[in-house]
Amino acid sequence: MASLAEKQLLKALFSLFLLVLLFSDTVYSSRKTLDQRKPCKHFSFYFHDILYDGDNVANATSAAIVSPPGLGNFKFGKFVIFDGPITMDKNYLSEPVARAQGFYFYDMKTDFNSWFSYTLVFNSTEHKGTLNIMGADLMMEPTRDLSVVGGTGDFFMARGIATFVTDLFQGARYFRVKMDIKLYECY
């Protein structure tokens, strides 16, 4: 049989082992500090959206999948899927630097408001990879911030802000949004 001293030593060693095990996950790690005034990457792009109306198959970049009637004057419930060009300038026919692929839906009954979730797909000599963007687009505000929640390739695990400014609006058929993207976490 073990003596009392041996039992106390075993208890002390076991307690020490549990203590080391408990704190092994809380080891100090050097995390990047984020400087919100200075992004690690900054881009300005234009998003073009041409809604399919039954006659513009060749030019349409989006289509309303659900558009319930009778829910008010603010398109509440309308769901749109898009695959639109992203250009460096305002010209829709300019060479795209990326494609915006995703959806938005109108989610307010009392004003124009939508919620976006999309991926910018880059496949050029300058950039390869994706940026994932999502958030509320309060369309009546002059500027709106959406979250950059991740990415792949050149934008691996990027996080930041995409600021929207409506540049042109031609009713339900066409709109153009300037996106000012600032990434604050770049790896």
Image (cartoon, rainbow, N blue to C red):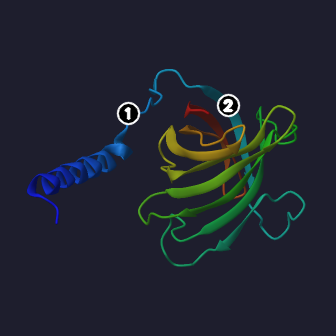
Tell me the residue at 63%/27% (across/down).
Answer: 42
Residue hosting label 2: 44
Residue 155: quarter of image: top right
SS for callout 2: strand
What percent of the width, then of the height, locates residue 160?
53, 37
Residue hosting label 1: 28
Q: Is residue 9 above or below residue 67?
A: above
Residue 3 versus residue 128: which sits nearer the camera? Answer: 3
Residue 173 versus residue 33: which sits nearer the camera? Answer: 33
Question: Is 168 displayed left or right of 138 in the figure?
Answer: right
Amino acid type, callout 2: Ser
**Between marks 2 and 1 in the image, the one whose residue lies nearer the viewer:** 1
What percent of the width, then of the height, locates residue 129?
75, 44
Tell me the residue at 38%/46% (across/down).
Answer: 25
Amino acid type, callout 1: Tyr
Q: Which residue lies furthest to the bottom in this view?
A: 69
Q: Is residue 147 above or below residue 104?
A: above
What percent of the width, then of the height, locates residue 127?
79, 35
Mark 2–mark 1 distance (CA, rounded to whole Å)? 37 Å
Q: Mark 2 or 1 closer to N-term?
A: 1
Residue 125: quarter of image: top right
Residue 39 versus residue 3: which sits nearer the camera? Answer: 3
Residue 156: quarter of image: top right
Q: Is residue 180 above or below residue 135?
A: above
Question: Is 34 displayed left or right of 41 in the figure?
Answer: left
Q: Residue furthest left?
A: 4
Please state, as top left, top right, bottom left or bottom right, where the N terminus lies in the image: bottom left
